Image (tube, rainbow, N blue to C red):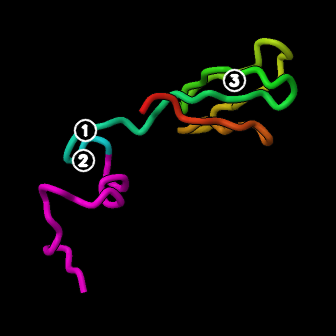
Amino acid sequence: MVLQNDIDLLNPPVELEKKKHKLKRLVQSPNSFFMDVKCQGCFNITTVFSHSQTVVVCGNCQTVLCQPTGGRARLTEGCSFRKKGD
């Protein structure tokens, strides 16, 4: 049985760190990221911000790739993506 007091504060588990607020983590890091989104029609790759506040369309075929919501942008059904960086 693991109690809340039995957690090593200098080396917290990754699962607990992801659940915490971005400013309350041991090392502060943002929740947002950039991603490459592949268009389902022409297979063109576009770089999109995860918390985009505008509608992002494909440069070639003008298909909508993602739409903004209150926080994270919602990808269009059928579009594939991968995180950039790391």
Q: Mark 2 sits on what residue? A: 25
Which stretch is magenta? 1-21
Please check the rendered image and state whether residue 59 is part of the magenta-colored stretch, yes or no.
no
The x and y percentages for residue 14 are 32, 56
How far is mark 3 from mark 1, CA to CA?
A: 29 Å
Q: Mark 3 sits on what residue? A: 55
Q: Mark 1 sits on what residue? A: 28
Q: Secondary structure at mark 1?
A: loop
- The first of marks 3 and 1 along the sequence is 1
Quadrant containing the C terminus is top left
Q: Secondary structure at mark 3?
A: loop
Does 7 sit left or right of 68 as displayed? left
Which amino acid lies under the numbered mark 2 shown in the image of this protein?
Arg
Does 14 sit left or right of 78 as displayed? left
The x and y percentages for residue 57 are 75, 20
How far is mark 3 from mark 2, CA to CA?
A: 31 Å
The x and y percentages for residue 26 are 19, 47
Q: Are marks 1 and 2 in contact (CB under 8 Å)?
A: yes
